[in-house]
């Protein structure tokens, strides 16, 4: 029962050593300036095969998979996304919806504050027996035939050869046509820049071999992102095995690159 | 000078031609440089987006300078949680490789709110196989703990079962693994 | 019901507001008045002669102000030229700048050629700045020989003839702009350009009839009844077409009952119940249909006819405005979640607010007034002065 004193001593010494090392290293950092951009080069890459290679604009294929069976509605993705892009209040690049089904086949959906506060309390405005309930994260579907690109009058939103639908904030005139055209409501008009904006699957992170921030912070692995050219990636395996993967609003003919695993039929 | 019967038409046509030429020249002059490289958009915008400031790191970027927390965090069930979710983004802390701002450390009531964001069983949509959930204040009552206690008084926030397991080992409830 | 109402977080805000209701309204008025001019200059409907010139100047005045609602709406109006420098080949909206330029040049040229004899006479009679203005407008030519007038006549007919497809595209593209948005089930129908065009003609002709009757009344001058009767007959024809297509669209959704019908029906029977069924259909469509039938089919005393012609014109102008409101704003109230509706609150002092709407609706009339000092609106006045 209990550790012998010698062992505890050893552990204490090891602990103090570690803390001292940490403190010394930390204080050294205060003195020795690191080269600019050290941030990303120091961080180990999360998507293999991107760092150190020239970016092949024409042969990239990425996929994003959302696993409904693992989302716990913590809202970490929403918080991280808001902080990464300084998204203004009242608008969302990504959000999480909560679905509730009762025994009369009635479906109740809500998304208080886009799920930004996590779901801290159950719905107080309905008094029904819950038959099934789940969370659905939503973001840009990165359609292969994007209706937003089709309607933009000035070429301010476009599909790149590497499959990402991006925005050109210097060209956008703020007409809001793309916002009307998106069937998934992924877009909004930023009131500060008065131009349109949407989730970009963190293109700036992916280009440096890092995962999109919402995928990075998701604690349960409900959001997955990967390179389909890498046969060992989780998304490649999911897309090529016998998983049932669906997309939202398939009848719109937009061919999204965002897939859902475990999506229920009630989700629109 | 008397104008002929169609001189007004000739002048109108001349005016229209000048207008069209000016418009065409204006369009060429004002066309952005990288336009049309890959398609009907400004190709430089792709690189502009790729070079956007990265505000978050990953857990590895935090743990490389914080090895003490690293060892605790990576050994526990919370290893999948992002440091930056509770503490704030990397860019608010490190700029050009140097510490330039302090990230907040959460305190008692803040910790309780953060824990309950995920672990509150009252939200039935949380799958049991993915996360263990509890109901407050029943959880405290069942553990015979004062209901004014906050989560961090029993749980190490970076590795929530660390002290619990150690306590169980000490009291002999759990075999040392 | 409230608990069941779910709107996607980004759908709460209505992005296309009153400026986008006003823009199709203004271009619709241009289209409708141009149709009257076309009926006279191309199709030779002689009874329309009294308002032939008025309709052209009216169209030009409204077209000159048509772009202001759009500039007030854009988040970045200083970049509006991007639409003409780098227009997207797949976007209906990118045609806006080009179509507008072609239309205003065309109608401007038609006005100059139609008025050339009058303007030459005025140039010879005036001095100073007005003289310079008239010299510019007549291309500094005083030739009014029969050959030049014959050339003018042929060119006018040609220009007005190509003006018909130009005017059709000017307003039709707006209809297609809405009709081509598959994400919004209340907008995406092939009937949308047709509905927009026919209701545009209705609004333009009603505006002309009303303006004609009111201006003549204010100046204590007689109204040419044959002209007004022709206009009312044409108005009735266009309105029957417009209303039929509007109703066809609604009933088609309600009969086919495809996936999104419940959201569209919920919209029309819920938030839009009063503005659509009671006002647009009931008071402003069924009632004018009856009035138009009565005006067209029965012989009436001149004063009664004039009064009800003006009344029906006012009601129809309101109908077309309501139709634009219900389509533009009403269509956005329906969330893409298909599970709920958001709300629209018109502001007074917003850049797209009510005050702006009032100012932009008054502006074309001010322009019309200024133009009437340069281009005399009425043929009888010209004859009297020469």
Image (spheres, coloured by chain):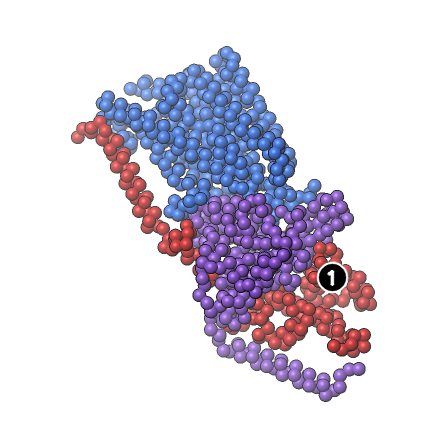
Chain colours: A purple, B red, C blue
Kindly state the secondary structure of the residue where label 1 is placed.
loop
The vertical placement of C146 against A136, above or below, is above
Residue at numbered disc 1: B133
Q: Residue at x 39, y 52 (%)?
A: B36
Residue A44 at x, y = what percent? 54, 70
Residue C139 image-quadrant placement: top left
Q: Residue at x 65, y 45 (%)?
A: C6
The vertical placement of A243 against B93, above or below, is above
Residue C226 at x, y = what percent? 43, 15
Residue C318 visible here:
no
Residue B125 image-quadrant placement: bottom right
Q: Quadrant of the N terminus of chain C?
A: top right
Single out the residue that lies furthest toward the bottom: A6
Q: Quadrant of the C terminus of chain C?
A: top left
Residue A117 image-quadrant placement: bottom right
Q: Is residue B80 left or right of residue C216?
A: right
Q: Nearer the viewer, residue B127 or A22?
A: B127
Residue B73 at x, y = what percent? 65, 72
Q: Nearer the viewer, residue C176 or A58?
A: A58
Residue A156 at x, y = what percent? 45, 50
Q: Residue at x 81, y 64 (%)?
A: B141
Q: Nearer the viewer, residue C1 or A199?
A: A199
Q: Is residue B55 left or right of residue C146?
A: right
Image mark 1: chain: B
The vertical placement of C126 against B69, above or below, is above
Q: Is residue B23 left or right of residue B159?
A: left
Q: Nearer the viewer, residue A249 or C48?
A: A249
Query: Disc count in the image?
Result: 1
Residue C237 visible here:
yes
Q: Residue at x 46, y 39 (%)?
A: C69
Single out the residue that lies furthest toward the left: B1
């Amino acid at each position: 029962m209990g550790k012998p004193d010698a062992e505890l001593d050893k552990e204490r010494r090891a602990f103090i050593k570690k803390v001292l090392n940490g403190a010394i290293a930390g204080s050294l950092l205060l003195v020795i300036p690191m080269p600019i951009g050290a941030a990303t080069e120091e961080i180990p890459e999360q998507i293999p095969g991107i760092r150190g290679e020239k970016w092949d604009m024409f042969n990239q294929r990425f996929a994003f998979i959302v696993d409904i069976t693992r989302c716990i509605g913590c809202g970490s993705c929403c918080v991280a996304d808001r902080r990464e892009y300084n998204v203004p209040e009242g608008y969302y690049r990504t959000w999480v919806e909560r679905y509730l089904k009762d025994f009369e086949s009635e479906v109740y959906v809500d998304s208080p504050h886009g799920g930004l506060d996590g779901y801290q309390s159950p719905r107080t405005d309905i008094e029904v027996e819950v038959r099934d309930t789940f969370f659905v994260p939503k973001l840009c579907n990165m359609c292969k035939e994007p209706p937003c690109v089709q309607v933009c009058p000035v070429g301010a939103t476009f599909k790149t050869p590497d499959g990402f639908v991006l925005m050109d904030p210097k060209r956008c005139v703020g007409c809001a046509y793309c916002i009307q055209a998106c069937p998934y409501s992924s877009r909004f008009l930023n009131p500060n820049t008065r131009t349109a904006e949407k989730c970009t699957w963190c293109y700036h992170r992916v280009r440096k071999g890092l995962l999109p921030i919402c995928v990075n912070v998701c604690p349960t692995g409900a959001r997955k992102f990967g390179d389909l050219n890498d046969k060992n990636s989780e998304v490649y395996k999911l897309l090529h095995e016998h998983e049932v993967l669906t997309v939202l609003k398939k009848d719109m003919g937009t061919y999204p690159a965002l897939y859902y695993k475990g999506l229920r039929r009630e989700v629109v | 000078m008397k104008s002929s019967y169609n001189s007004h038409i000739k002048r109108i046509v001349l005016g229209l031609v000048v207008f069209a030429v000016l418009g065409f020249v204006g369009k060429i002059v004002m066309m952005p440089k990288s336009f049309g490289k890959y398609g009907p958009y400004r190709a430089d915008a792709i690189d502009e987006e790729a070079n956007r400031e990265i505000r978050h790191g990953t857990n590895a970027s935090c743990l490389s300078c914080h090895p003490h927390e690293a060892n605790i965090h990576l050994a526990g069930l919370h290893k999948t949680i992002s440091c930056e979710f509770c503490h704030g983004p990397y860019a608010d802390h490190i700029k050009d490789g140097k510490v330039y701002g302090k990230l907040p450390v959460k305190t008692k009531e803040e910790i309780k709110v953060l824990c309950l964001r995920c672990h509150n069983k009252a939200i039935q949509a949380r799958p049991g196989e993915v996360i263990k959930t509890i109901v407050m204040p029943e959880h405290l009552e069942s553990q015979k703990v004062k209901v004014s206690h906050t989560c961090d008084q029993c749980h190490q926030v970076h590795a929530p079962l660390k002290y619990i397991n150690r306590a169980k080992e000490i009291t002999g409830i759990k075999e040392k693994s | 019901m409230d608990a069941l109402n779910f709107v996607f977080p980004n759908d709460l805000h209505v992005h296309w507001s009153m400026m986008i209701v006003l823009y199709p309204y203004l271009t619709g008025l241009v289209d409708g008045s141009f149709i009257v001019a076309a009926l006279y200059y191309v199709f030779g409907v002689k009874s329309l002669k009294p308002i032939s010139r008025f309709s052209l100047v009216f169209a030009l005045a409204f077209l000159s102000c048509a772009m202001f609602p759009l500039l007030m709406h854009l988040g970045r109006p200083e970049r509006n030229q991007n639409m003409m420098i780098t227009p997207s080949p797949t976007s209906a909206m990118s045609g806006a700048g080009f179509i507008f330029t072609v239309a205003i040049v065309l109608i401007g040229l038609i006005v100059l050629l139609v008025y050339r004899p009058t303007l030459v006479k005025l140039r010879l009679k005036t001095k100073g700045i007005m003289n310079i203005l008239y010299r510019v407008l007549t291309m500094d030519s005083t030739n009014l020989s029969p050959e030049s007038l014959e050339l003018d006549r042929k060119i006018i007919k040609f220009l007005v003839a190509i003006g018909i497809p130009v005017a059709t595209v000017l307003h039709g593209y707006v209809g297609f702009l809405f009709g081509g948005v598959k994400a919004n089930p209340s907008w995406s129908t092939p009937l949308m350009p047709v509905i927009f065009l026919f209701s545009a003609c209705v609004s333009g002709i009603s505006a002309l009839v009303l303006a004609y009757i009111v201006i003549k009344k204010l100046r204590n001058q007689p109204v040419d009844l044959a002209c007004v009767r022709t206009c009312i007959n044409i108005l009735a024809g266009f309105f029957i077409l417009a209303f039929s297509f509007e109703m066809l669209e609604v009933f088609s959704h309600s009969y086919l009952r495809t996936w999104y019908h419940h959201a569209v029906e919920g919209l029309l029977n819920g938030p839009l119940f009063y503005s659509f069924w009671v006002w647009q259909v009931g008071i402003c469509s069924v009632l004018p249909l009856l009035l138009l039938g009565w005006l067209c089919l029965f012989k009436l005393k001149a004063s009664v006819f004039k009064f009800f012609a003006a009344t029906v014109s006012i009601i129809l102008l309101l109908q077309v405005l309501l139709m634009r409101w219900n389509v533009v704003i009403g269509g956005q109230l329906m969330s893409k979640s298909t599970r709920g509706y958001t709300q629209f609150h018109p502001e007074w002092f917003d850049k797209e607010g009510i005050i702006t709407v009032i100012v932009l609706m008054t502006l074309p009339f001010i322009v019309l007034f200024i133009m009437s000092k340069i281009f005399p609106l009425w043929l009888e006045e010209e004859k009297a002065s020469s």
